[in-house]
Amino acid sequence: MSNRLSWFINRFLRPAFGRAYVRIKGGNREPSWILWEILLPLIMITSVIWAYENMGAPEFFKGFVIIGGAMMSYWYNVLWGMGRTLYWEKETGNLEVFLLSDAPLPSLLLGMALGGMFNTTLRSIAVIILGVVVFKAEFNVDYLPLAILIFILTLVALYGVGLALSGLHIVYGRMGVRINELLDEPIMFLSGQYYPISTFPMALQYIAGLIPLAVGLDGVRRALLFSEGIDALWLHVLVLFILMIVFYPIGLRILNKIVERGRMDGRLILRWI
């Protein structure tokens, strides 16, 4: 085994999986948390489905809303579970330990992302299953492999955004909460959580095309609800791939720059900032 491969396994992957284990174990240790994290999103989903039913909307809108509610939870995980996670670690005194360890900071963030992704996926699957059972939503599983591909590309691009947000939280501390709140509603609107982005004016559609969640949501819905294959969705795959290879290096660069700046001015471990 080469030295580079040994370093990657021992100094990057092992800390990542170790941090993911903590996130998974901590997020599922209390059954009531899991129950409420499944039931609460269903309240909003139920209200929107009933609104569409009262308006006489086509049946596919049920699946439209269920997919939107399930995938939007990943955006919240990026904002709060990954974006703010280093600030939480600073508050609890763990950040100093992370910075003094041999593990690279991106490795620890990867572990946090994987752990949060696992927890969110379990809850999203439960939401979809309950949506199918309760509201009789129908999906075309023949196009499930394409939907999974689009979904994975969406997640990788989204967590690239999470890298950048993590760095901002380290430097700006509590102000990062305001950044999260500032991004929350616009992203929900532009991603088309409960409605198709094709209803937007063309200018807004172009802006939404820069948001991985908006492109991913549209692609997954069109695959599972309208039975569109790769010949119709190749542009979604291409755009998500481009966003993936753009956002991750940018997020990593922003994180490294902010951490370097924080080390120079002493803002990394000051808990009252």
Image: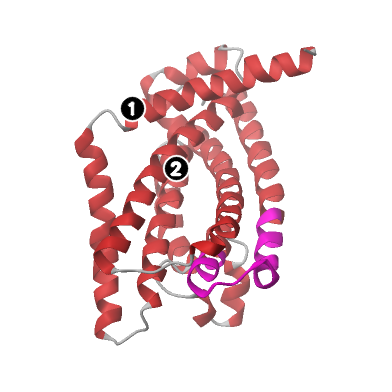
Q: Residue at 45% of width from left, 64% of height from top?
A: 186
Residue 257 shows up from this direction: yes
Residue 108 or residue 180, whichever sits in front: 108
Local packing at callout 1 (Cα closer than 10 Å; few below 14, some 14-19, many 20+) is few
Q: Nearer the viewer, residue 217 or 98?
A: 217
Residue 73: x %, y % from top left: 40, 52
State whether residue 15 is above or below residue 147.
above
- Which of discs 1 and 2 lies nearer the camera? The answer is 1
- Quarter the N terminus occupies: top right
- Which residue in the protein does label 1 denote? 26
- The image quadrant of residue 50 is bottom left
Residue drawn where x is 72% and y is 14% of the image: 6
Check disc 2 and give the amino acid type.
Gly
| Quadrant placement of the C terminus | top left
Q: Which residues are magenta?
A: 218-241
Of the image marks 1 and 2, the number of the one nearer the N terminus: 1
Dominant SS type (magenta): helix
- Residue picked out by circle 2: 176
